[in-house]
């Protein structure tokens, strides 16, 4: 493996299923060549230590004119298929600016943000205000290429029919009962939504205090975007002693700043957390299951 590819990142990707493009193992074998080809294509020089998330390698680089950027090389997966189109459409308005893209290689050249400063250390109320403001700023008409939330909901409804004893049946039934009203609304597939907008996916910048990264775009309802801010910074949520009050406050702040209907965002959070609970059961993740059920309980009507 190339020295540019951290062992920790290789460990994360190793063993991943094709989903449906290429297995993690096969992609890792190609990754050093993808990096070298991208550096050559855009005349880049590596300018720092490699970074990574769960599915992409990010290299700080210098362009031929000396300006700073980052090269992002993504393991091909469905959520990232149209990331470059979303970033291109936003044009740097609320999100990291796309400088160039090679969809065939799943590579992008992006403006360089402050990778050492995200919303994780910002006081939680302020962080939720930033996320709400970004949801509002990123609210654009959906691109026709994007996958649609209504299609995802159809798959969810099928999954929610059989959750097993680990997930209370009343929550499965509640999520299924909420879906018809959410789906029949005209907004369901109309907006381009960053579906993974949480504290680590917002970085400090020069031209705007905070910018979103890693959008996982979906043609959806903007109220669908609030949930990731509930399940992240979890230890802080639990430490307060009143989990329901803490999470409802987060949701209220986000919705107020984003201009969202709070009850609609609460309903989507229940639906999304039932899906998270199912994933946790499938992956034998007891901690994830406990968290999902706790959020579902916190989102219940008064």
Image (cartoon, rainbow, N blue to C red):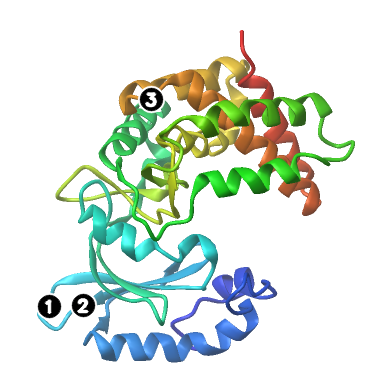
In the rendered view, does 295 fall on the left or right side of 3? right
SS of the residue at dot 1?
A: loop
Give me the disc on residue 4.
Answer: none
Q: Residues within 10 Å of mark 2 (few under 14, many from 20)?
A: many
Query: To which residue does mark 2 refer?
Result: 62
Residue drawn at the location 24% of the way across and 53% of the way down: 90
Query: To which residue does mark 1 refer?
Result: 66
CB atoms at circles 2 and 1 under 8 Å apart? yes
Residue drawn at the location 54% of the way across and 68% of the way down: 77
Residue ranking furthest to the right: 165
**Residue 189 percent across, percent down from the top left:** 44, 43
Residue 224 can be seen in this image: yes
Look at discs 2 and 3 and give the one toward the viewer. Answer: 3
Alpha-carbon distance for marks 3 and 1? Answer: 42 Å
SS of the residue at dot 3?
A: loop
CB atoms at circles 3 and 1 under 8 Å apart? no
Alpha-carbon distance for marks 2 and 3? Answer: 40 Å
Alpha-carbon distance for marks 2 and 1? Answer: 5 Å
Residue 288 can be seen in this image: no
Q: First in sequence: mark 2 or mark 3?
A: 2
- Residue 17, by quadrant, is bottom right
Q: Residues within 10 Å of mark 3 (few under 14, many from 20)?
A: many
């Amino acid at each position: 493996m190339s020295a540019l590819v951290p062992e920790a990142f290789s460990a994360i990707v190793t063993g991943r299923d094709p989903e449906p493009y290429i297995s993690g193992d096969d992609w890792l074998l190609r990754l050093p060549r993808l990096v070298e080809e991208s550096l050559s294509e855009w005349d880049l020089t590596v300018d720092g230590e490699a970074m990574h998330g769960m599915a992409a390698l990010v290299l700080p680089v210098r362009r031929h004119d000396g300006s700073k950027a980052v090269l992002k090389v993504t393991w091909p997966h469905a959520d990232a298929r149209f990331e470059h189109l979303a970033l291109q459409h936003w044009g740097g308005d609320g999100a990291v600016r796309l400088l160039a893209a090679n969809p065939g290689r799943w590579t992008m050249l992006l403006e360089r943000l402050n990778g050492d400063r995200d919303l994780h250390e910002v006081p939680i109320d302020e962080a939720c205000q930033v996320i709400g403001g970004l949801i509002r700023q990123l609210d654009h008409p959906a691109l026709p290429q994007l996958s649609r939330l209504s299609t995802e909901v159809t798959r969810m409804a099928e999954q929610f029919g059989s959750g097993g004893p680990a997930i209370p049946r009343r929550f499965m039934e509640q999520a299924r009962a909420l879906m018809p009203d959410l789906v029949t609304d005209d907004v369901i597939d109309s907006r381009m939504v960053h579906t993974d907008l949480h504290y680590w996916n917002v970085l400090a910048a020069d031209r705007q205090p905070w910018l979103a990264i890693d959008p996982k775009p979906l043609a959806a309802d903007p109220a669908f975007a609030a949930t990731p801010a509930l399940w992240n910074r979890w230890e802080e949520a639990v430490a307060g002693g009143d989990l329901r009050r803490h999470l409802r406050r987060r949701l209220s702040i986000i919705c107020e700043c984003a201009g969202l209907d709070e009850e609609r965002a609460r309903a989507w959070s229940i639906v999304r957390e039932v899906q998270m609970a199912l994933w946790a059961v499938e992956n034998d993740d007891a901690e994830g299951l406990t968290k999902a059920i706790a959020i579902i309980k916190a989102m219940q009507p008064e």
